[in-house]
Image (cartoon, rainbow, N blue to C red):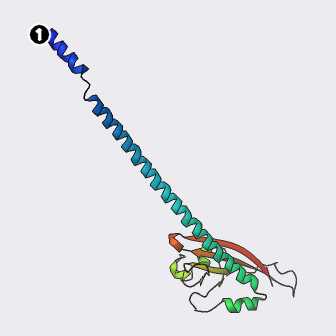
Amino acid sequence: MYRQETLQGKSKLLENEQGVTIVTVLLLLMLLTLMGVTATKTVINEKKSVRSEAVFEQSFYFAESACLEGVQKIANESTPEELLAPLIVAGAANEKLLISAHDEDPFNDTKNLDLDGDTLIDKDDLDLLQVSETNADTHRAVVQMPIATGDSLALGSSRVYTYMSYGMTSAHGGNAMIKLGYKKRF
């Protein structure tokens, strides 16, 4: 008889479902909270990605415009003497556009644009270059490459000069450098 009452008492406990609803609601609430936190993190990461892309694009276009400004300044000159006179300003800060290529390695961007000799293209170098008309944090430079043998067609004829135009920016926290080759016959 005692055994039968004990079994009936256990079955009554198992049939009592009053706490199941609370447990189910808590599990659902925990699942929804986890989904909300995950969605929030995803949105934050997407916003960072979009912001980074916007800064990259803006930096790219600032650098590109400075590069094209340098090309335009060279294209506007009609003789090498006219080109050299206004573009090389000895010792003037923010006025140096035309730079001679490095003697030993003329196609090395770092050697051409490292004006202070610390083997880095940094703010100190940019401060020596011409400021672009598009943005105060954007600079331009044009490197005159050595004249290759055979570029002159004949004695007394015009020469082909090769230039590398650079546009560099650190505007809005983004860094970009654009390089464009340009040839001009004088």
- Quarter of the image with the C terminus in it: bottom right
Q: Is residue 139 above or below residue 89?
A: above
Q: Position of residue 126 (x, y in %)?
A: 55, 80
Left or right: where 29 falls relative to 39: left
Q: Residue at x 22, y 16 (%)?
A: 11
Can the viewer see residue 106? Answer: no
The local secondary structure at tag 1 comes to helix
Q: 10 Å neighbourhood of mark 1: few (<14), some, or many (≥20)?
A: few
Q: Residue at x 43, y 51 (%)?
A: 41
Q: Based on the displayed image, in which of its 4 quarters is residue 137 positioned?
A: bottom right
Q: Total label count?
A: 1
- Quarter of the image with the N terminus in it: top left
Can the viewer see residue 17? Answer: yes
Residue lying at the far left of the rendered structure: 2
Q: Position of residue 81 (x, y in %)?
A: 75, 91
Left or right: where 113 falls relative to 49: right
Q: Position of residue 20 (x, y in %)?
A: 28, 29
Amino acid type at image mark 1: Tyr
Residue closer to the observer: 41 or 67: 41
Residue closer to the observer: 88 or 75: 75
Left or right: where 86 falls relative to 160: left
Q: Position of residue 7 (x, y in %)?
A: 18, 13
Q: Is residue 57 above or below residue 83?
A: above
Q: Based on the displayed image, in which of its 4 quarters is residue 57 positioned?
A: bottom right
Q: Based on the displayed image, in which of its 4 quarters is residue 101 positioned?
A: bottom right
Residue lying at the far top of the rendered structure: 1
What residue did someone put label 1 on?
A: 2
